[in-house]
Image (cartoon, rainbow, N blue to C red):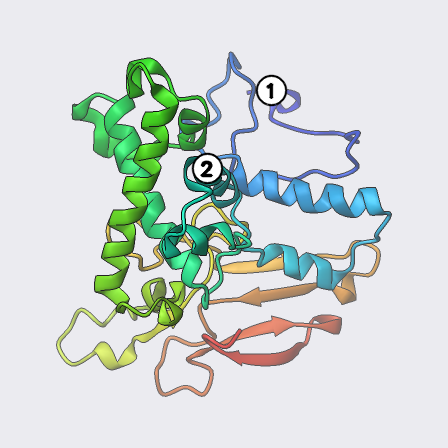
Amino acid sequence: MPVDQLPHSFNPAEGFVATANNRMTPEGDPYKVGFQWYSVYRAKRIKEVLEQAKASGKKLTLADMQKLQTDVLSIPARELIGLLRHAAGNSTDPAVQLLLSWDANVTRESAAAALFELWMQNVSAAVLRKVAPEGVWEIVDELATNLVGYLSHPSSSAFGANSQAARDQLLVDCLKSATDRLTKLEGSDAQKWSWGKLHVVRFRHPLDQYEGASFMDLGPVERPGDAETVNSTGYRGKSFEQVEGASSREILDPGDWDKSLAINVPGQSGQPGSAHYSVCCRSGQRGSISRWYIRGER
């Protein structure tokens, strides 16, 4: 493939380049750069934050970029809540009101985030069974990136003659079943619900498959975000355990390289007896290690 035909951007009008594993090639591109991509939501959120800064004249700092890399605002949540408002905005149901009053930030402590993630699973499954053949449900479930589109413009072929009413009922029914499931998982007191109780990450030592070696493992550690947030912490299936995400992050300052920052997740040693086993390092000025974090506190 000719180098000048690789996906590229040169001095874009926006004043920045932003990607997040989303598709960067146009339809009909003759070169098959890839076949599987993340949805546009993470890239869309990054661009949203950068464009807001540009519009306000704000000069972004290292701290701003740190905050952006760990951003957990969910655009799909924001969009689906808008549809829920149309479907049940006048409802006094506590679950409905919990989501309608939520700011769409998928934080560890959020009860609404926990409810949303279960609701999203139910809605995804219900919509896929309407728009996809039965034999490909499991495959499509991994690739579905247009859920909000199907719901925003419900077709009569999928939802029937009164498609909007059917769509609204689907959202309400799925929320009811999500509420019931979360109640079984975390109890009936919604004030004690939290996303972090369900969404954890475990760091497993390669030797933990041998009997008695599980003491080498670390976790579980409560995690924010999901697969569609800038701070991507994806999970699969009915388990909410994180199975993918960033293993390292870098913020590089070409104007002053010594101000660059980096953080590394896996720790500095594979030996449980080491003082550096369960920590990750953050490099600061002049490339030195300026601070250590026990995994889970950073």
For mark 2, give the secondary structure.
loop
- Image-based side of 57 in relation to 75, left or right: right
Residue annotated with mark 1: 2
Count of marks placed on residues: 2
State the image coordinates of residue 181 (x, y, percent, origin top left): 23, 56
Label 1 neighbourhood size at 10 Å, few (<14), some (14-19), many (20+)? few
Q: Identity of the amino acid at label 2?
A: Tyr
Q: Nearer the viewer, residue 128 or 256?
A: 128
- Image-based side of 53 in relation to 45, left or right: right
The residue that appears at 40% across and 51% down in the rendered structure is 92
Mark seen at residue 80: none
The residue that appears at 46% across and 42% down in the rendered structure is 89
157 over 282 or under it: above or below: above
Residue 196 visible (yes or no): yes
State the image coordinates of residue 105 (x, y, percent, origin top left): 53, 56
Q: Which quadrant of the figure has residue 204?
A: bottom left
Q: Earlier in the sequence, mark 1 or mark 2?
A: 1
Residue 235 visible (yes or no): no
167 over 283 or under it: above or below: above
Q: Identity of the amino acid at label 1?
A: Pro
For mark 1, give the secondary structure.
loop
Residue annotated with mark 2: 38
Q: In the displayed image of the protein, which residue is found farthest to the left?
A: 211
Q: Are marks 1 and 2 in contact (CB under 8 Å)?
A: no
User: Marks 1 and 2, Cα distance to the nearest angstrom?
Assistant: 25 Å
Q: Nearer the viewer, residue 161 or 216?
A: 161
Mark in the foreground, 1 or 2: 2
